[in-house]
Amino acid sequence: MFPVATARSKRKGLRVPVDFKVRCAYGGNGRPTVMAKAVNMSTGGIFITTSEPIKPRARLVLEFLMPATMNSIQVQGESVWSRPCAFQDRQLQGTGIKFINLEEPYLSLIRDYALSKLYDDAFVKGEGIVQLLSDIRNLPPQWRLKAYHILIKKGDKNLPSHKSPHS
């Protein structure tokens, strides 16, 4: 049975941990810029920490290097919440940012990266299979099928091999 509907179970993408710097510019060129650290991400948005608060509903242009690639991503976002948070023994501001009109090829880059985390045993164990299945069920059909295949193959390799007594 899946958990009661929560904000997480309504997500349209698989949220995965990340660790990279994000340049956040208010409204585009010539506007103030804030440097942030990305903590987790999905195709729907990104959670960042900063030393400076970002006001809710602020429109931003985000720029970052996609992990495990040399691809620079520049996307528009909107701050949906912001609050103080303790992170690695420091008091920072945590902000949830919703991507606005995330298009190809950025959508596929982020989705492929998120799906690749399903190969990571520590990630799967840490998130918990019930929660991952809850997140995966909201993916578009072709990506949901790919995610299920990854998890099934992982399960197959962890099963003991059954040898026939006649071999």
Image (spheres, rainbow, N blue to C red):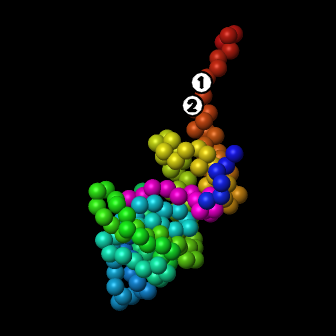
Residue 156, quarter of the rendered image? top right
Measured as percent of width and height from the top left, residue 26 is found at 40, 84
In this orientation, does residue 3 appear?
yes
Relative vertical location of residue 102 with respect to residue 18 in this rendering, above or below: below
Residue 152, quarter of the rendered image? top right
Is residue 19 inside the magenta stretch? yes
> Residue 158: which disc?
2
Regarding mark 2 in the picture, which secondary structure is present there?
Answer: helix
Write the start and end of the magenta stretch as one range: 7-21
Regarding mark 1 in the picture, which secondary structure is present there?
Answer: loop
Q: Between 20 and 4, which is closer to the camera in this rendering? A: 4
Q: Amino acid at mark 2?
A: Asn
Give the labeled residue for mark 1: 160
Number of other residues with Cα within 10 Å of mark 1, as a class: few under 14, some 14 to 19, many 20 or more: few
Q: Amino acid at mark 1?
A: Pro
Q: Residue at x 59, y 49 (%)?
A: 131
